[in-house]
Image (cartoon, rainbow, N blue to C red):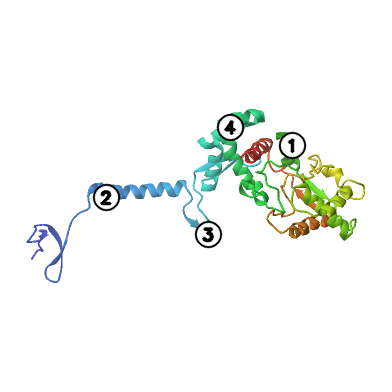
Amino acid sequence: MAQSTQPIKDPLTGAETTGHVWDDTLQEFNNPLPRWWLYAFYGTIIFSIGYWILYPAWPFASSFTKGFNTVTYQTAEGQEKTTHWSMRALFAKDMQEGEFAVKQRQYLEKVAATPYDQIAQDPDMSAFVRSYGASVFNDNCAACHQAGGKGVLGKYPSLADNDWLWGGTADAVQHTITYGRNGFMPAFKETFNEEQLTQVSNYVLSLSGLPADADAAAKGERIFNTETGGCYYCHTKVGKGLQSQGAANLTDKVWTIATIDANAKPEDNLTKIKAVISNGVQRQMPVFGQRLNETEIKVLTNYVQQLSAQ
């Protein structure tokens, strides 16, 4: 007897079923997939095959299939390089040819061709300098001078206080960044005895109006301004310092080496001043002229000047 080919239907709903029944009444409906869903599924299969051909996809031995799609970009050496598609290559290309990169390059060219004083007067260029310069500063300078140029007392000068050891003009700042600086003060521990060291330290404290022993300071002034100490050669006889030598102004209450606190005990400040004079100063700012190009140095110069003007 031939088996019936009539579809089995649910007696309650009249919907076609597969004929599978559980617990006497639970049946499985035979609902075909919508055609649009089925075509979409077939489309994903076709798309995946195309993707596997064009892009890196499958592991292969110790490597992977590279795909036929390529990306062409300029290397750091200025050479054109074509490689298989990858996010790294695509990022390099976008950094050179993307909309943002093109605008950034245009602004850099504009800044490079504009004098410093005109950059400061142009709101758009000043804003660009703050944005781009902050990135250059954070990558190259913030490790020592800290974010925002606040510096580290006793180690690295603040760039935000308008007090400049080597000068704060655009030319001076640009020269400092390009060629670096060597900060040096000789150690006087073999030159001064303990009494002379105390006297000169008291005089240095008095220059900035801090509490000091008046008699010792008067004697320290004679040592400071004569051949006995010779301090005036760099700091001048009034203690104003020489930017040509990177010698600090001792009268402005801005301290870059000794961690002086106006609210501290006078004897504590005296001890710190004595340590600096006794041990001297030797520090170096690296040369950035070989690390940054001329335009980056110009942007960084303007950015540092903006920090000091805040």
**Sequence-first disc among 1 and 3:** 3
Asked which quadrant contains residue 197, the reply is bottom right
User: Which amino acid type is shown beneath numbered disc 4?
Assistant: Met
Q: Element type at marker 3?
A: loop
Assess disc 2: are there few (<14), some (14-19) or many (≥20) residues with their C-alpha within 10 Å of its C-alpha.
few
| CA distance separating discs 2 and 1 | 72 Å
Assess disc 1: are there few (<14), some (14-19) or many (≥20) residues with their C-alpha within 10 Å of its C-alpha.
some
**Sequence-first disc among 3 and 4:** 3
| CA distance separating discs 2 and 4 | 56 Å
Dots 3 and 4: beta carbons under 8 Å?
no
Residue 250, horizontal then vertical, whole percent = 77, 46
Kindly identify which residue carries mark 1.
172
Asked which quadrant contains residue 26, the reply is bottom left
Of tags 1 and 3, the one toward the viewer is: 1
Assess disc 4: are there few (<14), some (14-19) or many (≥20) residues with their C-alpha within 10 Å of its C-alpha.
some
**Sequence-first disc among 2 and 1:** 2
Of tags 2 and 4, the one toward the viewer is: 4
Kindly identify which residue carries mark 2.
38
Q: Is residue 44 above or below residue 194?
A: above
Dots 2 and 4: beta carbons under 8 Å?
no
